[in-house]
Image (spheres, helix red, strand yellow):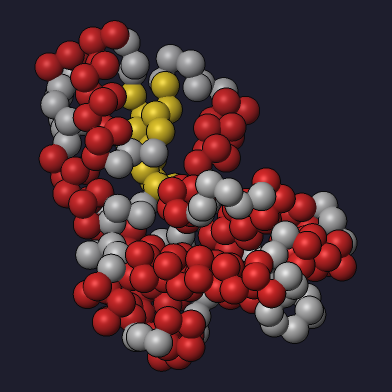
Amino acid sequence: MREAVAASPPAAILVVDPYDGGTGKSRELCADLRSLLLEFPSATVLAAMDTDPGRSRDLRTLGEWGVADVICLEEDDTQEALYRRLRAVEGRTLQNLLQRTLPALISGRARMLVMTAAEVVSVGGKAHDLARRLHLSERTVLRWSARAGLPAPRRMMAWMRILLASALLDDPGRSVLSVAHACGYSSDSSLRRATTDFLQAGPSALRREGAFERASTAFLEELAVTRAAGTGRYSLRF
């Protein structure tokens, strides 16, 4: 399973039975699952299990381990219910990190654009996919970005890729090459050029000092400069 998680794209969802072998209420949570989540904290893991009152302690423990959500075997037993449960967590790793990072005073429109860009990048989308996801024209997204004090969409999407790569670099179990491929870079050299351009550091150096923390700090600094300038700092081309 470790190899599969290491090679999986950022939007992959892992559905597991969180217990070791056995039956009934004597079953114990799987220690290997805990180890997996320590090695790949960015992985989106759902636990498929019964949620009777006797399992409340296990539910708390799974949340502490980093399990994203629970599929209730007694209730989520239709295709539609499973789809809703999976859709609710798809591509949420970067969004959850940004929710904790973005300043509270950022406008609602700016937050919506950033969060949608994060979701699109997490599922492998490009700049033009941002407009499609928002059901807007590319020109409208460009105008909204400028008015919200955000970089132009292409620059924004490039930042989201950097932030996503940084989040994955903080996973001890991922190699630099696997992070590069997961985030749409053709090679580890391509990722290195991108991080050097945006963050003035290569992936290995970022990993040592906390990649996402450094990347998010640099992103917020650029947002502040862009807002202060009153318009997009970069070419207003989609």
Is residue 69 or residue 157 the one in the foreground?
Answer: 157
Above-or-below relation of 199 to 25? below
Is residue 110 or residue 125 the one in the foreground?
Answer: 110
* Left or right placement of residue 229 versus residue 24 in this view: right
Identify the residue at image location x=39%, y=39%.
68
The picture quadrant where one finds residue 199 is bottom left
Is residue 45 or residue 24 the one in the foreground?
Answer: 45
Identify the residue at image location x=76%, y=52%.
134
How many numbered marks are there? 0
* Left or right placement of residue 157 versus residue 53 in this view: right
Above-or-below relation of 129 to 225? above
Above-or-below relation of 102 to 206? above
Image location (x, y in percent) of residue 218: 45, 73
Where the C terminus falls, by quadrant?
bottom right
Q: Can residue 165 be seen in this view?
A: no
Image location (x, y in percent) of residue 209: 24, 73
* Left or right placement of residue 158 versus residue 233 in this view: left
Identify the residue at image location x=59%, y=32%.
84
The picture quadrant where one finds residue 154 is bottom right
Image location (x, y in percent) of residue 103: 51, 52
Where the N terminus falls, by quadrant?
bottom left
The picture quadrant where one finds residue 45 is top left
Q: Can residue 96 be seen in this view?
A: yes
Identify the residue at image location x=22%, y=23%.
58
Image location (x, y in percent) of residue 182: 45, 69
Residue farthest front in this picture: 228
Above-or-below relation of 167 to 60? below
